[in-house]
């Protein structure tokens, strides 16, 4: 989120935007988002498996 605020603020204030850095930053933001989503999905799968093994319904 901070990346987008910084990039948009840079464009609005009229300062030159370094396109290479902007694209690199966007790639990093996308990678971090993918990792977090992957961790969430993995955790949900483990929790479902744990509840299935313990016999708890819900």
Image: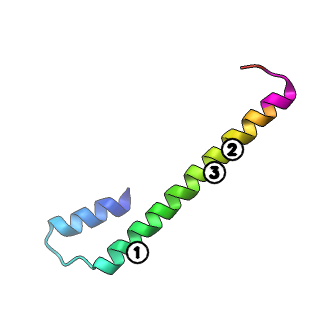
Q: Is residue 54 magenta?
A: yes
Instruction: Identify the residue position indicated by label 3 in the image.
Output: 39
Instruction: Identify the residue position indicated by label 2 in the image.
Output: 43
Q: Distance between the residues labelled 2 and 3?
A: 6 Å
Q: Looking at the rendering, which quadrant does residue 49 occupy?
A: top right
* Circle 1 crowding by C-alpha within 10 Å: few under 14, some 14–19, many from 20: few
Is 27 situated left or right of 37 in this image?
left
In percent of width and height, residue 31 lies at 51, 63
> Helix, strand or loop at disc 2?
helix
Circles 2, 3 touching at the beta carbon (< 8 Å): yes
**On screen, 20 above or below 37?**
below
Q: Work out which quarter of the rendered image holds the C terminus and state it.
A: top right
Q: Residue 24: which numbered mark, if any?
A: 1
**On screen, 29 above or below 57?**
below
In percent of width and height, residue 3 lies at 36, 63
Q: Distance between the residues labelled 2 and 1?
A: 29 Å
Q: Residue at point 28% right, 77% down?
A: 19
Of the two numbered discs 3 and 1 on the same chain, state the one appearing first in sequence. 1
Q: Give the range drawn in magenta.
A: 51-56
Q: Nearer the viewer, residue 37 or 10?
A: 37
In percent of width and height, residue 52 lies at 80, 29
Circles 2, 1 touching at the beta carbon (< 8 Å): no
Circles 3, 1 touching at the beta carbon (< 8 Å): no
In percent of width and height, residue 20 lies at 33, 80
- Main SS of the magenta part reads helix
Is 44 situated left or right of 1 in this image?
right
Of the two numbered discs 2 and 1 on the same chain, state the one appearing first in sequence. 1
**On screen, 3 above or below 38?**
below
Q: Residue at point 22% right, 69% down?
A: 10
Q: Is residue 21 magenta?
A: no
> Helix, strand or loop at disc 3?
helix
């Amino acid at each position: 989120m901070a990346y987008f605020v910084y990039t948009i603020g840079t464009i609005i204030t009229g300062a030159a935007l370094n396109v290479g850095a902007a694209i690199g930053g966007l790639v990093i933001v996308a990678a971090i988002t993918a990792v977090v989503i992957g961790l969430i999905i993995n955790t949900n799968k483990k929790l479902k498996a744990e509840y299935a093994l313990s016999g708890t319904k819900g």
